[in-house]
Structure formats: structure tokens, C-alpha cells
Amino acid sequence: MGCGNTKPNQLQLKKSERGHLSVPAATAMRSALLIQRWYRQYVARLEMRRRCTWNIFQSIEYAGEQDQIKLYNFFAYLMDHFTPASSERNLISHIFRDNDLLRDIEWERYFNYKNIEIPDDYCGPHLTFPLTTCIVTELVEAFRNKQQLHSRYVLQLLGETWKLLRLLPNINHVSTCHSKEITICGDLHGHLEDLLLIFYKNGLPSMETSYVFNGDYVDRGKNSIEILLILFAFLLLYPNDVYLNRGNHEDHMVNLRYGFTKEVLGKYRLHGKKILKLLQKIFSWLPLATVIDQKVLIVHGGISDTTDLSIIAKMDRHRYVSSLKPPKHRRFLAKSKVCDDDSDVEDAGAVGSVERRRVFSLTHSSPSASLHRSMQQRRSLQSSSGVEEELQEQRRQAGLSVEHQSVCSETELTQAVEADAEEWKQLVDLLWSDPMTLDGCVPNEVRGGGCYWGPDVTEDVLNRHHLHLLIRSHECKQEGYEFCHSRRVLTIFSASNYYEEGSNRGAYIRLGPDLIPHVIQYQATRTTRDLTLRQSVGRTERSALRALREQFFAHKSDLMSVFQQYDPDNTGLISLKDWAVAMETVLHLALPWRVLRSQLVNSTQDGMLDYHSWFRELDITEPNKELAHTNVLETLYKHHSNLETIFRIIDTDNSGLISFEEFRQTWKLLSSHLKMEISDEAIVDLAHSIDFNHDGSIDINEFMEAFRLVDSTHHDMGNSMIKAPS
């Protein structure tokens, strides 16, 4: 009975205990859910800020590439339409010359390294050929320790690389065998620390560790030449295990703008010009694609709806010293086997006189207009008696009748022009294109070259060539990689901290016999690895907004003009909606201005923005404002990169100095490009203001640095106008 009496009490106690414990348990559960919801919102806000930051960096980068292509197209227009004696044409004509008119033996003589002496006090690495594993490893360690390779060895290494590259096909074919893994790396852009980290994690290139490097080795970073020398050394050491694809930055015209030209001339003042000339040839001989096990295609940029690997495999890739520049027409009399079976050498003098073909731009356009202009030019040439007599003599020696001559010349020229247009388009698409989520294929107007292609194009091109996967680079990704198009396209980017420290990870791919890509991510800088997510986002956000504010200042007059259109009563106030529309109208950056408004607009009055005060709050200082006319200064800030590109082109001896007259011609060339008037008086005032030692010449680097925009918030974050979102 005692047991029967105690059982209800025990049950009651347990119930009481359970009731007592249920309250804190429920509270804990509710607290956990609230914390979880808060954390998710916190992470979502950080992710939104990170994406906005990313859009700013990428939009400014692509706008710069578009500017570069527009400037090059302007130069090409001058070459096509200005007389040979015009001063504007003479300034830039040397960048359009074809170097291939020299025979190989003449090139070897020009780049002869044997007469370059190495001083006794040289303490850098030494090279002997053929290279050995020990020598190349020592070269890598020397670059790790900030040492520089002597120019004699640089020219010798580049010369040997050039000889090897000329033997390689346009498309390399690689096999994983049964157990061999292949490592694929994306853009490095002069980030030597990323390449060294990849070697540390994955191993140096060897017969057991094969590598495919997918272009864009140079520009932007500060160690582009070291990366090239390391990769070329391993290519010579393991030609069957190291593969290099060409990227859109392996192009001397692009290098003028993005830093590689300046880097080489700064590190090799005496022989920098020869090194750059030889690199032009090397870049043009780099293979265009790599195929692994007949199933995986690796190209730098991408594809289009007309991509044909059979055309790419047969093209003369070395004709494209710059992908921005269409090649000259091949002499159809020399090339045609129908017209002249014995002709195997082009007439160098004639090649120089043939009109350089121009296709609309680096986007998808029909070549018909270009063909029409070319045919008109050819007909006008044939109306000249001297040229006609020469053609008649060539035809007579070929044993052709008059009727056959006419049909042959017209047909051959038409076919040559169409073939050149198609071939050039294939190359540009490989180097410049980007994928998009929508079906179809449209011109890549954001970059100014190549196309945007959709999932349907990926499906078609891969199926047509019996491929499973496309690996490409060309685009910086926050995680270092990104799948798209139902995982049939994989973007890989190997330069971490590309825009700013902490902005993105780098990554590389390991591909085994199963052809399943395994991605390895990394961050090259230790300090960024130790940052929290909030610190990392805040750091890159400040850098992006700083770059954006510089864009505002450089376009101040244009923005003010549009603001005033929305303020017809001259109140100095506009709505935030009108502000957002005006920003996109002027800058064309396709940014979410309403989302960015909280970081860019400091204060409002009843939802209205005082745009005069807003400009004053940008915290951008104007260096040397008293030195020159306001319109010239603003033009300089807005077109800073274009101006530096023209300076580098005009500085033909690569001395880093230009005369007052060359300085004046540079500004006249820029004003022609911009279709604006800049007075000689303003240009002279600007020149004298920067000639500090009064020697009549201007140091390009000092000039560009003196007029670089300075952000006061970069030095004093306490005065920053940036507001971190909650």
C-alpha cells in the first residue's frame, strides 16, 4: 500500500518538475530563433553590401576596358582616314606597323643578348641553357626574395620561348592518362604571391604535376614580368606538361593602359624596349585553347554562336599581334594557289601598302560594310595605271587569261576579306566574351569586345564538338570560381585580392581522369584571412566607394548639367529619384543607385538633395588646382587613363620623357578623340606648371601622379562621408 500511496506523489513531482523546466526551455528556444533570424538578416545585409561593392568595382573596370577599345578605334580611324603626312597620324603610326616583315634571322640579330655584359656586382639568379630543374627552382626563389633577373638572361629566355611557341599548335591537346591530375589556373594579373601560393599548395610544375595557365598573366599587378619568366622557364623545362593559353591582356595595346608596359620599362630601363618588342611576338604565338581528353575545352574568355574549333585550329594566330587590331589583307595573288601556284613569299613592300581592314568594332557585326569599303578601295587602286600594269604582269606570268584574271581577282579578294573577318571574330570571341543567364548571343557592349552568350549557345557548341565542359577565366569571381549554364561552364580566377585586399578569393582546379573539377580556394594575404566578414566587407566597401566618388568628381560638370535639368527653378535641390536617374544617365555604370544612396548621400531636406552641398561633401581634393584651366583639369581627371596611354604611345624611345611639342600634340589628339576644343594657351600653361626643373621636357610618371585625384578620406577616415549601413 505504501507503494500505492507514493506513486501519485512521485508522478505529481515529475509533472511539477516538468512544468518548472518548460518555461526556460521555451524561452531558450524563442531566443535561439530570434538570434538565428537576426543573424540571417545581418548576413543578408552584409551580402547585399558585398554585392553592391562588387558591382561598383566591376562596372568601373569594364568601363575602362570599353574606353580602351574606343580609344584604339579612334586611332584606327586616324590611320584609315588621315593623310600619311598628317601630324596626328605620325604620332601613332608605329603601333600599327607589322613586325613580321622582318625575317626570323633578322629578329634573332635584333634581339641578340650576347653583347650584353653582366656586371661583377650582379647578385641575382644566373641561367644556363638548356634549363634544369635546379636552375628554374632557383629562379622562383630569387623572385620570391625580390631579386631581379638580368636583362641578358631575360632576352635569352624570351628568345628560347619564342622559338618553342612557334612549334606549338593553336589548340593544345592534353591527356590525363590513367591517374594523372592536371591543374588549371585562371587570371594571375601580376600577382606573384598567388602563383607562389599555388606552387606551395599544389607543387611545382613537373612531369607528375601538369599545369594549364589560362591567360592574363600580366597588367594590374606589380610582378607581371616575373610571372611570365617563371611560366616560360617551366614551359621550356617541361614542354609536354605546361600549357599556356593567350588572354586578352597578352596584347601590347592593352598593356599600354593597364601597367605592364610601365612595369617593364621601369625595371629594365636600358633594354626594356627590346624586351617589350620580343614579348609582342611571343604573345602573338601563344596558343589559343587547350582540350583535355577531347572532352574539356579551356579558353580564356569564352565562345559565341559561331565558334568553330576547326577554323581556330587552322588560323595564323601570330598575325594577331593585338586582338584589337584586324590583320591586313593577305595578298590574294601570293596566297592563291589558283592564280599563282609558285608564289610562296609575300611582297613586303606591297603588304605595307594594302589597306588595313576595319570591322565595325570588337562586337558582333556584319563585315559587309567593311567588305564594301575594301572593294571600293581596291577598285580605286586598280584605276591607277601603275598598279594595274603591275597586276597585269603578275597575271601574265601566272598564265591567266584576261577573263580568268578578272574573276580570280574579284573572287579571291572577296573570299580573303570574308575569311579574315570570320577568323578575327573567332579570336576576339575566344579572348573577350562572357556568359549570361539568358539564351542567345549578343554583343558585349559592357566590355566593348566579344559577346555575351547564353546556355543554349553553350549546349550547341559543346555538343557540336563532342565536349562536356567549358573552363574559362576572364572574370573576377568573389569566391574565385563560379559554375553556370547547368554546370557546363566553369569560370576560374586565380588572382586573389584583385580589386582590394579582401575583395575576393583566388582558386585553381584539379582535373583527374574522371574529368570532375575539384576547386581549391585560397587567400594570398594573411592579414585579410584574419579579418571577420564585417571587417572584410567594410574594407572593400570603403575602397569601392572611394573609387566611385572619384568618378563623380571627374564627371562633375556633366552631373551638374543634368542636375540643373531636373531643377528648372534653380533651387539647388533635386529629388533622390532624379539624383539616381542622373547618376546613371551620366556614368552608365548600371549600378543600383537607390540601394547605394544611403552610402553616397549624406543628408537631405524633406527628401530633396542639395546637390551643390553634395559635391562639396565628396571629400575629393583637387591637386594643383591653381596650375591650369578648369576645363583642362576636369578633362585630365576624367580621361586620366586615356591620356597616359597616349603619352606611352608618343614616347617612342621609352625614355619616360616627352617634349613640350609632344605634350601639345598629345592633348590635341585627345581633344580630337573627345570632340572638344582645348586652347593652346591652356595646354601651354599646364605644361609649364609641371616642368619643375625648366628643362623643356615633362616626366610622364611625375605628371600623371601630380594630377591624380586624392581622396582625403583615404588619409583621414574620421572625416569620411561614407556611412556604414546598419
Image: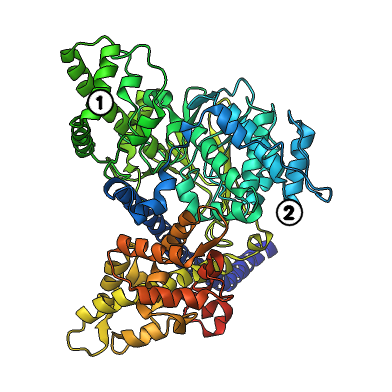
Percent across and percent down for residue 563 are 26, 79
The furthest residue to the right? 120
Residue 265 to residue 245: above or below: below
Residue 609 to residue 236: above or below: below
Amino acid type of the residue tagged 2 in the rendering: Lys
User: What residue sits right under mark 2 in the picture?
Assistant: 146
Percent across and percent down for residue 237 are 69, 29
Percent across and percent down for residue 435 are 37, 43
Percent across and percent down for residue 285 are 51, 32
Residue 304 is left or right of residue 262, and the answer is left
Residue 597 visible? The answer is no
Residue 548 visible? The answer is yes
Instruction: Give the residue displayed 42% in from the left and 64% down from the top.
Output: 52
Q: Which label sits in the foreground, 2 or 1? A: 1
Instruction: Give the residue displayed 72% in from the left and 42% down from the top.
Output: 116
Q: Nearer the viewer, residue 438 or 92?
A: 92
User: What residue sits right under mark 1 in the picture?
Assistant: 413
For label 1, the SS is: helix
Residue 577 is left or right of residue 148, and the answer is left
Q: Quadrant of residue 350?
A: top left
Q: CA distance from mark 2 to mark 1?
A: 53 Å
